[in-house]
Every structure is written in C-alpha cells, then in structure tokens.
Amino acid sequence: MAQAKAKHKKHVLHSHDATKPASTEAKSDINITPLIDVMLVLLIIFMVVTPLAQKGLDIALPQPPPPGSPPPDPSKSNQVVLGIEDSPSGPIISVNKSPVATMDELENRLKDIFQARSDKTIFVRASGAVLYGKVVEAMDAAKGAGVERIGIISEKMVEEAGGGGGAQP
C-alpha cells in the first residue's frame, strides 16, 4: 500500500524551485538599460548647466574710419582718459592729464564730467608698475560716478599710435 501511495503522489513545487531559470546557460549579451539611464541623466544635467556656464564680456569694438576721411584731431576729442602712473610716493591718478589727489576727489570730478554727457565712456591708461588693486579701485570710483563703459588703453596701443611711453605730466 505504501507503494501505491507513492505512485499516486503528485509532484510538489517548492518556492526555491520556482525562481530557478529553465536554462542555466550564461548570457553573452550586456544589459544596456542601466547605461541608457545614466546617459539620459547626464544629458539632462548638461542641458541644464550649459546655459548657466556661458559667460562673456560685452564689448563694442571701434570701427575704422572710412577710406579717404581725414584723421581725427586729438585736441578736439571729448574722450575722458583716466591715467594711473607709478611714483615712489604712490600712484599718481589723473583725469585728462589733470592730477587728482584722492579717490573721493576723483569720483567728484568724474561726476561733474559725466553728469551732462550722453556718452558715459571712460578710458583707463595705467602703468604696468601700478598695483592691480589701485587700478580696480579707480575704475570702481568711475563706475560710482556714473560711467557705464570702461575701455582699457594698453602700452602696446600707445606705442602703435606713436605716443610717448613716458609718464604723463
């Protein structure tokens, strides 16, 4: 009778048998789904960050004079030049070759100059021996006086224009 029971016993499926794959062969292909997920996340990050990372400087380049026109007379120019030269007693600051004693006096003089002007552009000409902080401080005073655009005059530009490289009077 025990044998009869054994013959009629149904096959019982255990839970650990249900999770086994039907074939135990190794897969030879790579699962690329996680790779695609990572690439999409990186793409989104770069799309968000790229517009924020673009920094630039707005400049207006001077246009050359038309051919055949007479050269401009520098004595009639109404450009404002902020000069900063080095000396043993400290930097000498001047506005259109007129010396200025302090930063407060510089700001007041520039306010007087730029108060009635529509073109609020100043050019800075500084000696290479002057400390960078002093040049920035003078440019900051100019911004406080109402200057909207600041141009830089380099020593190379002065040499090309035929101007003297010496100190301003």
Image (cartoon, rainbow, N blue to C red):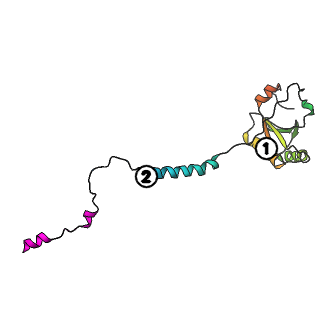
59 vs 90, nearest the viewer: 59
- The alpha-carbon separation of the residues under discs 2 and 1 comes to 56 Å
- Label 2: few (<14), some or many (≥20) within 10 Å? few
Residue 23 figure quarter? bottom left
In this rendering, the answer to whether 84 lies above or below 10 is: above
47 vs 17, nearest the viewer: 17
Left or right: 143 in relation to 27: right
Q: Amino acid at mark 2?
A: Thr
Residue 133: image x %, image y %? 73, 43
Which residue is at 63% across, 47% downward?
53
Secondary structure found at label 2:
helix
Is 74 one of the magenta-colored residues? no
Residue 138 figure quarter? top right
- Please state the extent of the stretch shown in magenta in the rendering: 1-24
167 vs 74, nearest the viewer: 74
Checking the image for residue 33, the label placed there is 2
Residue under pointer 1:
139
Residue 51: image x %, image y %? 64, 48
Can residue 90 be seen here? Answer: no
In this rendering, the answer to whether 89 lies above or below 38 is: above
Quadrant the N terminus occupies:
bottom left
Residue 121: image x %, image y %? 83, 42
Which residue is at 8% across, 73% downward?
2
Checking the image for residue 39, the label placed there is none
